[in-house]
Amino acid sequence: MRPQDIYDRISEFSGIRPGAGSDEAKLLEAALFVEDVFGLRLIDDEICEENLGTPASMAKFIIKRLEVI
């Protein structure tokens, strides 16, 4: 998967999800999205604002986990 493909999928997710709900709920939803779409299994320590708090941080995290160059 190319980095652009990752950014595109995240953009689609971000555009669909409204900003309502608690921060915890948003992080959980983002984690479920990452697991479902990118086939990654996240551990509790990875489900945090730093990794999943913004589309940019999410893309960086996914690219690193998938070892996309």
Image (spheres, rainbow, N blue to C red):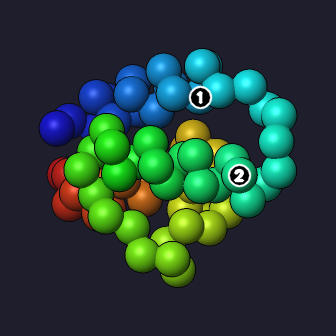
Q: Residue at x 65, y 26 (%)?
A: 17
Q: Which residue is label 1 attached to? A: 14
Which quadrant would residue 50 be assigned to in this image?
bottom right
Residue at 42% x, 75% y is 43
In this picture, residue 54 sits left or right of residue 67: right
Q: What residue do we see at 59% from left, 28% from top?
A: 14
Q: Is residue 24 left or right of residue 48?
A: right
Tags 1 and 2 touching, CB below 8 Å: no
User: In the depicted view, which residue is nearer to us: 2 or 15?
Assistant: 15
Residue 51 position within the rendered picture, expressed as x and y whole percent measured from the top left: 54, 62
- Identify whether 5 is placed above or below 58: above
The residue singled out by tag 2 in the image is 25
As helix, strand or loop, the secondary structure at mark 1 comes to helix
Q: Amino acid at mark 2?
A: Ala
Distance from the alpha carbon under mark 1 to that under mark 2: 14 Å
Compare marks 1 and 2 and give the one earlier in the sequence: 1
Say which residue appears at 31% left-offset and 64% top-offset. Answer: 41
Q: Is residue 39 left or right of residue 14?
A: left
Q: Is residue 18 visible?
A: yes
Count neighbours of disc 1 (C-alpha within 10 A) and say few if under 14, some if 14 to 19, many if 20 or more: some
